[in-house]
Amino acid sequence: MKTLTLVVMALALTSAVSLAAEPSHQYVGVKVCAMCHRTPKSGEQFQKWEASKHSQAYKTLLTPAAKKIAEAKGIKGSPADSPECLQCHVTAYNAPASQLGPRFSKEDGVQCETCHGPGKDYMKMDIMKNEKEAVAHGLTLLSVKDGSAQKFCETCHNKKSPTFKEFDFKTMWAKIAHPVPQQ
């Protein structure tokens, strides 16, 4: 009985370690997304992001104003190194290095994969053309209609932010919306 218990425990531990070791989706970075998402056919989504405040989110942490806000909140050191700031100012905050592809850069701020999920497994054209397949490969779809987009945005745009002003989702969504044009 003792041997059987040990075997069962060993199998359970091996299974748990195997599951934990399975690779998760990898972040590729906005430069990779831009290769396909900068054309008129795609709605020039990259340019919309590039012109948005999201593209500058990390850079704002390098400003004297950010340093002053951080000091007022008791954050020591640079806001650009602070977990309290990075969690909303960069994509893949706290992701292990193994999950960050070679072209990924936190300096790109809040980029595509913040909302749409790590793209390595769904970025291929044949997968992207099939929404169900893309979702199965890690694409996250947010919807205004079901409220998931607003709920996600409010994970950062909320009263915990030291620079929070009332968040009017409808107005702000209009500034960042990037639908693919109907063919």
Image (tube, helix red, strand yellow):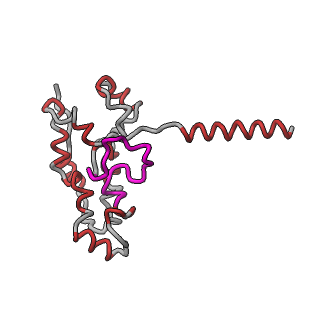
Q: Residue at x 33, y 25 (%)?
A: 127
Front-lying residue, 167 or 131: 131
The magenta segment is: 86-109
Residue reaching furthest to the top: 126
The answer to whether residue 83 is visible is: yes
Query: Is 181 included in the stretch rendered in magenta?
Result: no
Percent of width and height locating residue 13:
67, 41
Q: Is residue 98 above or below residue 169?
A: above
Front-lying residue, 52 or 167: 52
The answer to whether residue 142 is visible is: no
Percent of width and height locating residue 5:
80, 39
Residue reaching furthest to the right: 1
Q: Residue at x 18, y 47 (%)?
A: 50
Q: How many marks?
A: 0
Query: Is 87 included in the stretch rendered in magenta?
Result: yes
Q: Quadrant of the C terminus?
A: top left
- Relative side of 21 to 178, left or right: right
Q: Is residue 93 above or below residue 127?
A: below
Q: Is residue 23 above or below residue 128?
A: below
Percent of width and height locating residue 36:
22, 32
Q: Quadrant of the N terminus?
A: top right
Front-lying residue, 42 or 103: 103
Q: Is residue 13 above or below residue 161?
A: above
Percent of width and height locating residue 154:
32, 55
- Residue 161's image quarter? bottom left
Q: Residue at x 26, y 37 (%)?
A: 33
Q: Residue at x 37, y 57 (%)?
A: 87
Residue reaching furthest to the front: 102
- Residue 42's image quarter? top left
